[in-house]
């Protein structure tokens, strides 16, 4: 299946500059799908109510640009997402996230009402590999066209967060930790994510890669200038381009490998528009390693080590100077390995499955990742 990624350089979030870059990238990718008179869901990455400059969520300038294009093309626009795994999917939480992420201002500028419908429905995908049934927010069920507007980030568990991962936001908030408990191995989790994307089938995806996140994302990493807007009608193709852009081998990312196995994408992705020049000093997450495609089919040594992750994988460790005892890690942990003791978080590492949900949702950057001596040795050998 031929995949084209549209690319446009974009050096800042200045409103006019972003709009021109989004237009250029979308045009290079083949243009918007037909939205005239149709109900259109614009699905951003609203992981949490983090400040805009932390690069945790899709920048409001990009959301505005895509929203305006949809409205100008005659689409009936809704902006909706279910925030991260530790956040209740209710009106109070949505209001806080909309405010902190700049979505309130975007809605006012576009002249639309924000979504506060927190209902959801069950949808089935009989051909699913890991999952046959998902609970999905109403807006994704009711939309006639879905346009995903994702953020370029690293991810401790999935290694990379882009188009495919952004679709996970159609699952209601507190349902998300259940998937981490059910699929503690990241390769199985990736199969679930591809099943979800094949159910939802976003019609187009646009990536905010102006400033991405490097290091131990998707919450605790650092903002990193990348300088692009990317667009595609293939979530898998866009991710391949973005992974190449930040120097992460596509064949090392489990979601991309799953898509390749299923024939959902070619080995090569064409780039139209501005040349994509890889960022040479982009820092991957501490869990990342480089693989080759063939090794995935053989279930190599790394995957076996991943399954006994208590030996190999980094473990969450509390920074007591930063921890405020908010209890977010306790609420989100799918296996109840976190608890609060004397107003500080602590982890039972014998139960911990290394899904990193706690690290993902910690607002205070109070969770560090450390390997054991044996894990450090193994990591140095197989890396």
Image (tube, rainbow, N blue to C red):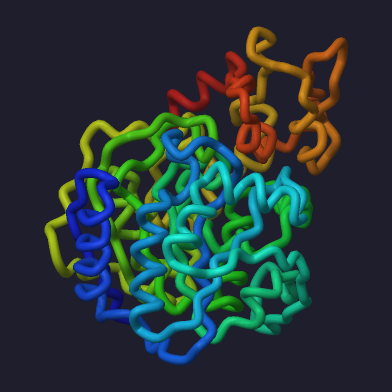
Q: Is residue 296 left or right of residue 374?
A: left
- Figure quadrant of residue 8: bottom left
Q: Position of residue 365 (x, y in %)?
A: 58, 23
What residue lies at 61% left-to-right and 40% top-to-bottom? 306
Residue 116 seen by the camera:
yes
* Above or below for 191 versus 50: below
Residue closest to the far bottom: 37
* Above or below for 381 versus 298: above
* Image quarter hosting the C terminus: top left
Q: Position of residue 248 (x, y in %)?
A: 34, 45
- Figure quadrant of residue 192: bottom right
What residue lies at 27% left-to-right and 72% top-to-bottom? 26
Taking depth in this image into account, of 204 and 247 the one nearest to the observer is: 204
Residue 256 seen by the camera:
no
What residue lies at 60% left-to-right and 31% top-to-bottom? 313
Q: Position of residue 239 (x, y in %)?
A: 38, 59
Q: Position of residue 14 (x, y in %)?
A: 25, 47
* Image quarter hosting the N terminus: bottom left
Instruction: Report the number of discs.
Output: 0
What residue lies at 50% left-to-right and 76% top-to-bottom? 77
Taking depth in this image into account, of 57 and 253 the one nearest to the observer is: 57
């Amino acid at each position: 299946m031929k995949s084209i990624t549209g690319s446009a350089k974009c050096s800042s979030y200045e409103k006019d500059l972003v709009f021109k870059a989004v237009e250029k990238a979308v045009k290079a990718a083949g243009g918007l799908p037909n939205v005239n008179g149709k109900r259109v869901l614009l699905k951003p990455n609203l992981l949490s109510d983090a400040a805009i400059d932390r690069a945790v969520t899709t920048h409001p300038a990009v959301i505005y640009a895509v929203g305006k294009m949809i409205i100008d093309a005659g689409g009936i626009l809704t902006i909706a997402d279910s925030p991260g795994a530790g956040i209740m999917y209710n009106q109070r939480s949505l209001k806080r996230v909309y405010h902190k992420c700049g979505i309130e201002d975007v809605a006012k500028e576009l002249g639309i009402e924000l979504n506060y419908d927190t209902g959801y429905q069950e949808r089935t995908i009989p051909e699913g590999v890991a999952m046959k049934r998902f609970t999905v927010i109403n807006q994704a069920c009711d939309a006639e066209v879905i346009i995903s507007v994702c953020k370029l980030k690293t991810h401790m568990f999935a290694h990379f967060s882009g188009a495919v991962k952004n679709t996970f936001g159609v699952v209601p908030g507190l349902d998300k930790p259940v998937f981490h408990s059910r699929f503690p191995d990241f390769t199985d989790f990736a199969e679930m994510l591809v099943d979800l994307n094949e159910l939802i089938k976003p019609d187009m995806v646009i990536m905010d890669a102006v400033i991405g996140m490097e290091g131990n994302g998707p919450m605790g990493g650092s903002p990193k200038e990348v300088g692009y807007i990317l667009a595609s009608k293939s979530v898998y193709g866009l991710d391949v381009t973005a992974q190449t852009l930040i120097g992460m081998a596509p064949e090392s990312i489990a979601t991309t490998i799953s898509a390749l196995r299923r024939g959902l994408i070619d080995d090569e992705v064409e780039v139209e528009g501005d040349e994509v020049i890889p960022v040479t000093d982009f820092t991957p997450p501490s869990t990342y390693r480089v693989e080759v495609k063939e090794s995935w089919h053989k279930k190599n040594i790394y995957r076996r080590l991943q399954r006994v992750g208590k030996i190999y994988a980094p473990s969450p460790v509390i920074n007591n100077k930063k921890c405020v005892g908010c209890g977010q890690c306790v609420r989100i942990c799918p296996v109840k390995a976190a608890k609060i003791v004397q107003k500080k978080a602590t982890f039972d590492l014998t139960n911990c499955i290394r899904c990193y949900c706690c690290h993902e949702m910690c607002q205070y950057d109070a969770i560090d990742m450390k390997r054991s001596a044996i894990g450090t040795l193994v990591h140095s050998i197989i890396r």
